[in-house]
Image (cartoon, rainbow, N blue to C red):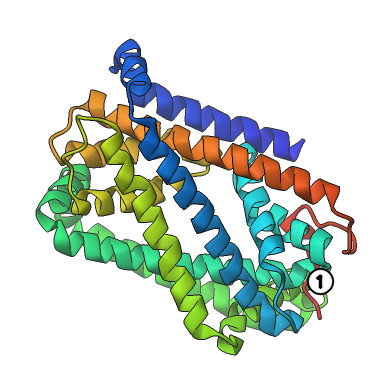
């Protein structure tokens, strides 16, 4: 029931965003433009997609190697990554759990181990995204500064006019933080006897262990290489789709970098496959390069649909392969709350 409610809420958010995006778009003209797109470039993007997923699987194996004592099969880690993306398309944020459960099934890797390394992997992706955001702001400062000033300018000016209120709010937050810390230290011994606290602290300890697996990497050079390769293929997957439409074929490499950043932010939204949020972020970014909302949303839709098609294709095949394999692990964990991270 919980997953059903989560799915319906996510779908409702996506539907609202889509209505906002497409309410002024000529859908008939968009459909014609999508039919006239050069699908050869979409095919190339599909090949790059499998390279990115393979590289992500290899990198994940490098993270697990020092913890489990051996490097998991590249085939198995890639299958797990693909099934994770497939699950994420159905229920947002289920991909990570599904990925860990798949590795448990294929190679018997304990879920507490793999889940911690997934968190570590995601943190590195966040760092890469932040670096790319900074690089994009440096290279495209004029365009992006105008965009964000228009978006948040009124709010910032309001804060400047209410400086005393802002300072007061910060003081209150600091006071609440100090009070929370005092209460925690005062009743720490009692909390340690609470089952819920024990579960939360054990889970946090396991995540920390997974995060610290980075320190034990046996091949840090390979980890860095695959991190760069993943994001380079993400960039190319978006950039080459510019050439699938005559209206966007003239966009340059910097536009591709902007789309990568904006699209990645949109994909982080809690909707199925970034639905709605991706369209808003990418369409808004393309407007900075002089494209009309009609053309911008057509390209954004083409990008999103192509990603979905390849996730369904590759992920569906991977899911069937996983089902055909014999199960090696213990009980398959389906929710993070069920993970026992004690070692």
The image shows residue 309, relative to residue 22, as above or below, that is below
Q: Is residue 268 visible?
A: no
Residue 288 image position (x, y, % from top left): 16, 41
Residue depicted at x 77% and y 35%? 1
Expressed as whole percent of the image width and height from the top left, the position of residue 183 reads 62, 76
Tell me the quarter of the picture where residue 283 sits: top left
Q: Dot 1 surroundings within 10 Å: few (below 14), some, or many (20 or more)?
A: few
Would residue 75 be seen by someone viewing this image from the given angle?
yes
Q: What residue is at 64 percent from the left and 37 percent from the top?
A: 90
Location of residue 241 (image quadrant): top left
Q: Is residue 110 left or right of residue 148?
A: right
Q: Residue furthest front?
A: 40
Q: In the figure, is residue 127 to the left or right of 244?
A: right
Counting from the top left corner in percent of width and height, residue 282 is at 31, 40
Q: Secondary structure at mark 1?
A: loop
| Front position in the image: 48 or 283 | 48
Q: How many marks?
A: 1
Q: Nearer the viewer, residue 217 or 122?
A: 217
x and y percentages locating residue 43 in the rendered image: 44, 39
The residue closer to the viewer here, 54 or 308, is 54
Q: Is residue 193 above or below residue 281?
A: below
Is 102 placed above or below 135 here? above
Judged from this view, the residue extending furthest toward the left is 142
Residue at horizontal 77%, vertical 79%?
Answer: 192
- The C terminus lies in quadrant: bottom right
Please tell me which residue is depicted at 32% across the width and 21% down the height of the picture.
36
Q: Is residue 327 left or right of residue 14?
A: right
Residue identified by numbered label 1: 194
Q: Answer with left or right where residue 316 lies relative to residue 198.
A: left
């Amino acid at each position: 029931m919980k997953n059903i409610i989560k799915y319906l809420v996510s779908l409702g958010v996506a539907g609202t965003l889509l209505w906002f995006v497409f309410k002024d778009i000529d859908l008939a003209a968009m459909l014609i433009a999508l039919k006239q797109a050069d699908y050869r470039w979409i095919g190339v993007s599909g090949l790059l997609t499998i390279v990115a997923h393979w590289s992500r699987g290899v990198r994940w194996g490098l993270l697990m190697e020092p913890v489990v004592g051996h490097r998991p099969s590249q085939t198995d880690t890639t299958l797990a990554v693909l099934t994770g993306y497939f699950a994420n398309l159905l229920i947002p944020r289920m991909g990570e759990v599904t990925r860990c459960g798949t590795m448990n099934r294929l190679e018997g890797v304990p879920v507490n181990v793999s889940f911690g390394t997934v968190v570590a992997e995601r943190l590195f992706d966040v760092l890469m995204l932040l670096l790319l955001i900074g690089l994009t702001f440096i290279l495209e400062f004029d365009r992006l500064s105008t965009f964000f000033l228009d978006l948040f300018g009124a709010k910032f000016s309001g804060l400047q006019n209410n400086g005393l209120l802002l300072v007061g709010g910060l003081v209150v937050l600091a006071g609440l933080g100090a009070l929370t810390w005092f209460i925690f230290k005062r009743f720490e011994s009692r909390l340690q006897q609470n089952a819920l606290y024990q579960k939360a602290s054990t889970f946090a300890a396991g995540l920390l262990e997974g995060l610290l697996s980075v320190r034990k990497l046996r091949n840090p050079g390979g980890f860095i290489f695959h991190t760069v390769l993943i994001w380079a293929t993400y960039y190319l997957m978006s950039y080459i789709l510019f050439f699938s439409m005559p209206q966007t074929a003239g966009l340059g490499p910097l536009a591709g970098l902007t789309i990568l950043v904006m699209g990645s932010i949109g994909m982080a939204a809690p909707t199925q496959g970034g639905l709605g949020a991706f369209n808003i972020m990418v369409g808004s970014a393309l407007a900075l390069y002089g494209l009309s909302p009609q053309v911008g949303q057509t390209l954004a839709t083409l990008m999103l649909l192509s990603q979905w098609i390849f996730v369904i294709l590759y992920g569906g095949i991977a899911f069937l392969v996983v089902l055909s394999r014999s199960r090696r692990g213990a009980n398959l964990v389906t929710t993070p709350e069920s993970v026992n991270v004690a070692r």
